[in-house]
Image (spheres, rainbow, N blue to C red):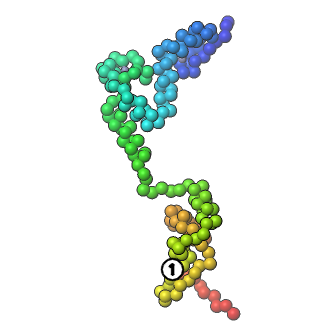
Amino acid sequence: MGKRYHCDYCDKTMVATPTIVKTHNRGMVHQKLVQEHYQQFKDPETILAEESKKKPCSRFATGTCQFGSICRFSHYTQEQLKAFQDYVAFKNKPQDVTFPSFEDLFHKFMVGKTSKPNDSDNGNTLIYDGNGVTHTLPWTYNSEYEVYGDDLPPSIKKMKLEDFAKAKIVEWG
Ligand SMILES: [Zn+2]
Ligand SMILES: [Zn+2]
């Protein structure tokens, strides 16, 4: 028995002579299966770009097109293409709420630490109380963490005046 060649796309085993393999690879069934295999990894942008260049396949509409995914005409309906367009438009739309990844935050934090604080940072270290007294906090608060809202651990939350209201003040000697 000679060497065997197995085509993974077609799940077919054949005698491994160059002619037989070449003929198989040129066959329409094989090409269709290869095309279908790669089609599933394409993103909607690619499919949309490819399909919008093609004319609709009139044979596919009547169910008589044998070319399947290797047809040079489009087998996507207007509705399907519209759905792709909507999806792509939605994906490229700037999102209102974006949560930066931890790496982004960490990077910003490290950069922020080495750069000089500007005036707008004062709000993070100054508290004005009801008696008109200005308190300067002995630490800087990193506003980048604010996106996490109430989920922040207390140690890096922004201090508010209310937070001190409940504090027990211990008299010192
Ligand atoms: Zn094959
Ligand atoms: Zn077709």
Q: Looking at the rendering, which quadrant does residue 80 occupy?
A: top left
**Residue 58: x, y in percent?**
31, 21
Secondary element under disc 1, as helix, strand or loop, is helix
Q: Residue at x 42, y 46 (%)?
A: 92
Q: Residue at x 61, y 58 (%)?
A: 107
Quadrant containing the N terminus is top right
Identify which amino acid the numbered label 1 is placed on: Glu
**Residue 120: x, y in percent?**
51, 72
Q: Can you say whether 160 is above or below 49 in the image? A: below
Q: Looking at the rendering, which quadrant does residue 6 occupy?
A: top right
Q: Can you say whether 127 is above or below 94 in the image? A: below
Q: Residue at x 51, y 79 (%)?
A: 162
Outermost residue on the top side: it is: 1
Count of numbered badges drawn on the protein: 1
**Residue 34: x, y in percent?**
51, 22
Residue at mark 1: C-beta within 8 A of ligand 2: no
Between residue 107 and residue 148, name the one nearer to us: 107
Could you tell whether 154 is left or right of 32 in the image?
right
Q: Residue at x 47, y 86 (%)?
A: 130
Asked if residue 57 shows in the view, the reply is yes
Residue where numbered disc 1 is placed: 162
Point out the quarter of the image occupied by ligand 2: top left
**Residue 81: x, y in percent?**
35, 34
Between residue 158 and residue 48, name the one nearer to us: 48
Asked if residue 166 shows in the view, the reply is no
Outermost residue on the right side: it is: 173
Quadrant containing the C terminus is bottom right
- Count residues near mark 1 (Cα–Cα under 10 Å), then give few for <14, some for 14-19, many for 20+: few
Q: Looking at the rendering, which quadrant does residue 73 occupy?
A: top left
Could you tell whether 35 is left or right of 113 in the image?
left
Q: Can you say whether 25 is above or below 108 in the image? A: above
